[in-house]
Image (cartoon, rainbow, N blue to C red):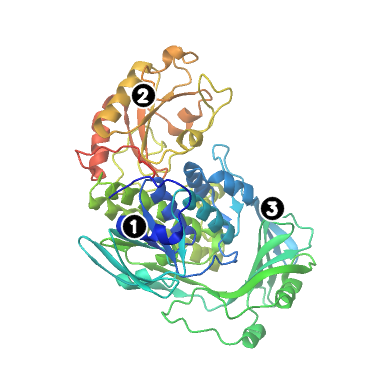
Amino acid sequence: MGHGILSGGEPVLEARVAHHRTTTDVLIVGAGPVGLSAAAELRRQGVHCRLVDRLQTRLPYAKAVGIQPRTLELWDRMGLVRAVLEAAVPLRGQLAYVDGREQGRIELAMPSEVAYGFAALPQYETERLLEQYVARLGTVIERGTELVSFTQDRDGVTARLRTASGADEELRVPYLIGCDGAHSVVRKGLGLSFEGGAFQEEYMLGDVVADWDLPHDYAIRSTRLAADGSTGDGLVCIPLPGAGRYRMSMKLPPGLAASLGAAPAAPDGVAHGLEGGRVPSLADLQAVVDRLAPRPARLSGLRWSSVFRISHRIVDRYGRGRVFVAGDAAHIHPPTGAQGMNTGVQDACNLAWKLALVVRGEAGPALLDTYDAERRPVGEEVVGRTVRHAVRGIEADPEDRRTLLLREAQLLVGYRGGPLSGASYGPEGAPQPGDRAPDCAGLRTPVAGYPLRLLDVLRGRAGHVVLLYGSGGAELAGAAAAAWTVGGLPAVAILAADAEGSAGPSAWPEDPSVPVYRDAAGEFGRLYLPDGATGFVIRPDGQLGARFPLAGTAAALSGYLRALSVRRDTPLRDPVVA
């Protein structure tokens, strides 16, 4: 596949589409946060993709609003996180009220070694920022273009598209990703099952301003008890950017449901998502707030409202052959804990780096089987957990509060025991292959007058990175040379805090291509628990790929590359973005 650099200014869409007809490596259907994340990671990995969406414009709906710390870490590595942080608002916790009295407060304070907290950002803003990012890398959304059908064979996928002008186009691509939501055309075309069920209740959402005196950086959950003492109606308010602005959700009152008309039948049997034709008014939302809010509040500034329904379903597999599904096309569930979009973003990043290696000819197609093996168990866990929390509350899980918090933040997602996770090494409690690679602070260089985080070191590196921890420049340089010889893998050296001569240049490896940082605060050592001189492979999605003694670098990396189905004659080089 060609990866030439496009020069000049932004070409017109027609010219870009004509170019893609011969050079598209991956067709992505659906330009929501998941499809845009897939495009972002593929382009960052030097892979050409075409991104189509049947909608003529971005929808102005604050559907998915919660941004988890793990998602911010992924966007940090892309170089996108600053724009998100400037647009989002902090979500510091949740205040719970029963019959107007505060009953509990959940603080979403992360451990000090976690760089980011929870945030809230309307989905339309998330999409805008991702759209700008992929445009800078050379891919624009083809609006008003929908996938009509597709077939695949052992050599590729033939897709039939209908463009905004109404013309039909046949496109031949090596791979296709369906990020086209709960009613996915790609999922149906693959014949995947989508087993689960639906909640009978209908809900309504509204993007409004409330003039109450409650703290804006906390979510509000307010319920009223029924006459028999059971929990009755409920109101959930998530803060959005803007003074007093919230996304409010509540059950649709029976009387209002009747006046808005019957719920439309789901043509595919999947009752999930917004119903654009049933629009509650500001007065409808105000009536519920008057009944349920813990403080008197006048609503104003309604941007949009809708009725929505909730289902819980998951596919039997995340792909077949050369075609894959991600996000809501693969799993849907209650919005409890803001898990859906964030899980979909991780789907996209997991699949994209693997597709990139295969497209670039550096790994065999067997690597793509690990997408389902790693991500479907995660989807099953998320669906089950969100359903439990929606029905019985977060107390349904008996874990301690810290574990619950880290799980909601998606920092405990891991693939231990999966097809890419090699043998464990190191003391009990140490992060192992398959786990998230922890961030840490306090890294120093001889030049910078300030400490860095590991996220700073990894930012902008699109491929695998080998971290080499030790006390001596010679052993670190030898391991770095082995990493490059075995797999063309770039290495970063981390000098132990107590390394002899670590304050001066004598401790640095002589090879100038190996960046060196000193674990001045000892935080890397505390979090990674190295067993003496130890090496770590950090995958492109921020998970640990391998952990090994530094003396066994060559053997360990050879084993990891075999697990990736990497071709022996094509080492993993840093991808070139084109």
Q: Please state the horizontal and vertical placement of residue 520, each as a whole percent of the image.
A: 52, 23
On the image, numbered disc 1 is attached to which residue? 26
Dot 1 falls on a residue whose secondary structure is: strand
The answer to which of 185 and 108 lies nearer the viewer is 185
Q: Is residue 467 left or right of residue 444?
A: left
On the image, numbered disc 3 is attached to which residue? 217
Q: Quadrant of residue 375?
A: bottom left
Q: Nearer the viewer, mark 1 or mark 3?
A: 1
The residue positioned 46% from the left and 60% from the top of the image is: 141
Lower sequence index among marks 2 and 3: 3
Spatial distance from mark 2 to mark 1, Cα to Cα?
A: 41 Å
- Say which amino acid is labelled 3: Asp
Q: Please state the horizontal and vertical placement of residue 319, each as a whole percent of the image.
A: 31, 62
Q: Is residue 437 left or right of residue 318?
A: right
Q: Quadrant of residue 433?
A: top left
The answer to which of 221 and 502 lies nearer the viewer is 502
Q: Please state the horizontal and vertical placement of residue 34, each as a whole percent of the image.
A: 46, 58
Dot 2 falls on a residue whose secondary structure is: loop
Spatial distance from mark 1 to mark 3, Cα to Cα?
A: 40 Å
Lower sequence index among marks 1 and 3: 1
10 Å neighbourhood of mark 3: few (<14), some, or many (≥20)? Answer: some
On the image, numbered disc 2 is attached to which residue? 533
Q: Are marks 2 and 3 in contact (CB under 8 Å)?
A: no
Dot 3 falls on a residue whose secondary structure is: loop
Q: Is residue 426 above or below residue 46?
A: above
